[in-house]
Image (tube, rainbow, N blue to C red):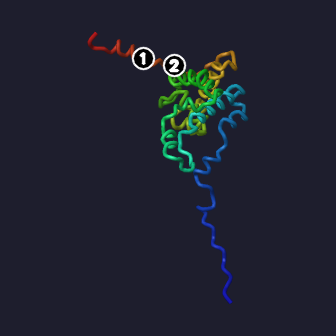
Amino acid sequence: MEPEAKPAAADPRETGPTPETVRKLRCDIVARLARDGRLGAEQTRAALEVRRVWEAFGRGLFPASRPVAPLAQRRRRAMFTDPVDRLTPAEESSWRLRYRPWAREMAITVAAGAIRTTRLQLVLDVVIDNHGLRQVEGWYRMRHGTAVEHIRAALHRYAEIAGWVDEPWPETRKSAAIRIDPAERTDEEVEGNNPFR
């Protein structure tokens, strides 16, 4: 008679989820900020629309697994399709009327921090990539609590452009930002630093 086999001891490294799984299962930061009352209804609506526009542009950028089509059909599919053509009419309207003017403005609005970053980048880091506020503040060496103020101000501006709110966001010392028009800055630098004038 053979002795009964004992189950192998579980390796502690194999019992927990992988870091990738933990990242995927992380709570939605926008939902948490809304639940905690740190984002208003209009700001949350703006964040969700920004996310929808990003997801809409990401559709069709990667190959799908499909049965092999005849050569003529494969050539037709291989031709470039403008990402805007993949949008539904509602998505195209959101992108053209709200997202595009907002993103252009936020891309030149510099948020505070030792490492210069824009409000657009902060929103993308939190709303699209679902990174935590402390993590983002650490990346850009921002004081604790300033990232959420910039994100709130940026999303409020989106709601203003959309016509969902009437009052502008009250800029506080924490959320104060610098708006730089790259064309004007370049002209001033050229005029002021031109040794041939």
- Which quadrant would residue 58 be assigned to in this image? top right
Callout 2 amino acid:
Arg
Is residue 98 among what the camera can see?
A: yes
- Labelled disc at residue 18: none
Callout 1 amino acid:
Arg
Along the line of sight, the residue nearer the viewer: 85 or 174: 85
Q: Which residue is mark 1?
A: 185
Q: Position of residue 149 (x, y in %)?
A: 62, 27
Residue depicted at x 70% and y 25%: 42
Q: Give how far apart the Cα atoms at labels 2 and 1 are.
A: 11 Å
Disc 2 element: strand
Q: Residues within 10 Å of mark 2 (few under 14, many from 20)?
A: some
Along the line of sight, the residue nearer the viewer: 95 or 83: 83
Residues marked 2 and 1 touching at CB (< 8 Å): no
Q: Which residue is mark 2?
A: 179
- Which quadrant would residue 134 be assigned to in this image? top right
Residue depicted at x 63% and y 19%: 161
Asked if 48 appears above or below 98 in the picture, the reply is below
Q: Position of residue 90 (x, y in %)?
A: 65, 27
Q: Position of residue 10 (x, y in %)?
A: 63, 67
Q: Residue furthest top?
A: 197
Q: Position of residue 183 (x, y in %)?
A: 43, 17
- Which quadrant would residue 13 be assigned to in this image? bottom right
Tally of numbered discs: 2
Is residue 174 among what the camera can see?
A: no
Q: Residue furthest left?
A: 196
In this image, 88 relative to 72: left or right?
A: right
Asked if 7 appears above or below 47 in the picture, the reply is below
Quarter containing the C terminus: top left
Asked if 187 appears above or below 117 in the picture, the reply is above
Q: Residues within 10 Å of mark 1 (few under 14, many from 20)?
A: few
